[in-house]
Image (cartoon, rainbow, N blue to C red):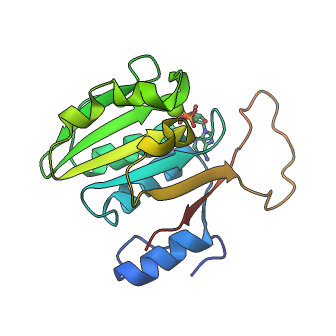
Amino acid sequence: MGTNGNTSTGGGDAASELARWRRGITAANAAETEALGGQLAALLPPNTALALHGALGAGKTTFARGFVRALGATSAVASPTFAIFAVHEAPARQIIHADAYRLASPAEADSLMLWDVLREPWTLLVEWPERLGEYLPDGAWHLWIEDAPPVAEVPPVADAPPVRARRLRLENAP
Ligand SMILES: Nc1ncnc2c1ncn2[C@@H]1O[C@H](COP(=O)(O)OP(=O)(O)O)[C@@H](O)[C@H]1O
Ligand SMILES: [Mg+2]
């Protein structure tokens, strides 16, 4: 087991996988964040919302893309900020990817017909979930994506994009 908690392929039993997610997992780059989205897709039960917390640019949409891809949906996963939500049909799951950033109020969520399109078994991925307020479905899982503490001082490489590791941590999953 590596010190970043990232060496698992997601093949352990569900309880130990969940414990790993609750301790927090480091993603060194966007590709790792996307891969972790695929791993959590295998753990999240059907008919459950996953609230994706994190600042602008944290990697919420990147994570959602990996989640949607892993379940076999082929539609493009972009930031649905303008549409508020997008529907992805996967073979065994209908995935609604919502971005509540531009909701004027939680009540507006209720008028979006989001609930009308939910078809079991569904997954609801929500960016900026606090803006859904009371409309976030009961029993939602909460994932936090934050800047990871620096592991070591890395000398900057001229003109290279900064390496931005993230810490992904699951809260209050069963
Ligand atoms: N470790 C990382 N995890 C996720 N994204 C990263 C990471 N390092 C750099 N990035 C970049 O940060 C950006 C995250 O964007 P996005 O997923 O749209 O964030 P959000 O939806 O949280 O606003 C992408 O351009 C991605 O390539
Ligand atoms: Mg986003």
Q: Residue furthest top?
A: 82
Residue in the image at 85% along x and 40% along y: 156
Q: 61 or 50, which is in the foreground?
A: 50
Q: 104 or 122, which is in the foreground?
A: 104
Q: 106 or 99, which is in the foreground?
A: 106
User: Is 71 left, or right, of 22 in this rendering?
Assistant: left
Task: Look at the image and tell me whether residue 5 can be seen.
Answer: no
Figure quarter occupied by ligand 1: top right
Rendered location of residue 17, percent (x, y): 44, 76
Q: Is residue 82 above or below residue 145?
A: above
Rendered location of residue 84, percent (x, y): 41, 24
Total marks placed: 0
Quadrant of the snapshot with the N terminus: bottom right
Rendered location of residue 81, percent (x, y): 47, 22
Quadrant of the snapshot with the C terminus: bottom left
Residue in the image at 17% along x and 53% along y: 121
Residue in the image at 25% along x and 32% along y: 87
Task: Look at the image and tell me whether residue 174 can be seen.
Answer: yes
Rendered location of residue 106, percent (x, y): 49, 32
User: Is 149 left, or right, of 2 in this rendering?
Assistant: right
Q: Is residue 120 above or below residue 112?
A: below
